[in-house]
Amino acid sequence: MDAFFTIVNVSATSLYVSLLSIAFNPTAWNIVARNEYRNKTITRIFGGNARYGCYFLAIMIFSFGMLRDHLYQRALSDQPRVPMLPAPYDTLVPIVLFAIGQLFVVTSTWALGITGTFLGDYFGILMDHRVQGFPFNVLRDPMYVGSTMCFIATALWYERPAGLLVTMYVYVVYLLALRFEGPFTDMIYSKRASAKKAL
């Protein structure tokens, strides 16, 4: 246990703030999006324009994502620095991980578009068909995988073992979010398919 406390500063408030921000984002957006699907709250705020409402939510999600990343980096700065990989892998591995992670995130956004990426289906803005190309032909949830890779890359780059523990936490949070997001999104599209068959 003493070895654990030499690599993780559990008394750092910034660590817990970071953990809260990581959990907040997918939790809040799932709650907001489900409310939007049922009550059209954001759409009504924008005068019935679902697309403007989705763009607003996209800006909020992106902004809070940037804040989450900032809080994570701040938390790492308060943690003990411990070399984890020998040179030159101490720089090569995090660079490669970050590059691949960003590739998954950026190409996912490109393939889905703004409304497809930022919960447009909850606003009633549905895609014509499921995206089959890269990176969705490699991973089912490339955006979450890519984001997780960026977390671990950052931990390795700054040589903070605590960051690896935070990354494990990120992965669990994303898995839990997908248990709610996946079935709900499937339900939205199955309802549309049923409605089309009824015509």
Image (spheres, rainbow, N blue to C red):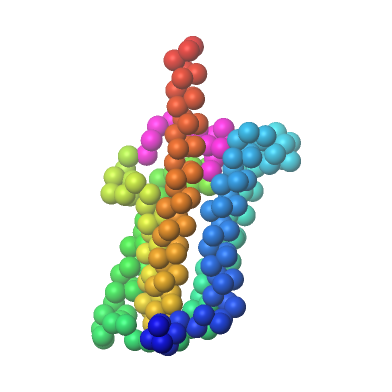
Residue occupying image coordinates x 62% and y 54%: 60
Residue segment shown in magenta: 119-131
Residue 162 horizontal/vertical position (percent) = 43, 77
Residue occupying image coordinates x 29% and y 74%: 93
Residue 78 horizontal/vertical position (percent) = 52, 83
Q: How many marks?
A: 0
Question: Is residue 50 visible to the viewer in this orientation of the structure?
Answer: no
Residue occupying image coordinates x 45% and y 62%: 170
Residue occupying image coordinates x 45% and y 27%: 190
Q: Residue furthest front?
A: 1
Looking at the magenta stretch, what is its main secondary structure? loop
Q: Residue furthest top?
A: 199
Name the image quarter holding residue 197: top left
- Asked if residue 36 lies left or right of residue 127, the reply is right
Query: Would residue 182 be counted in the magenta stretch?
Result: no
**As drawn, 112 above or below 85:** above
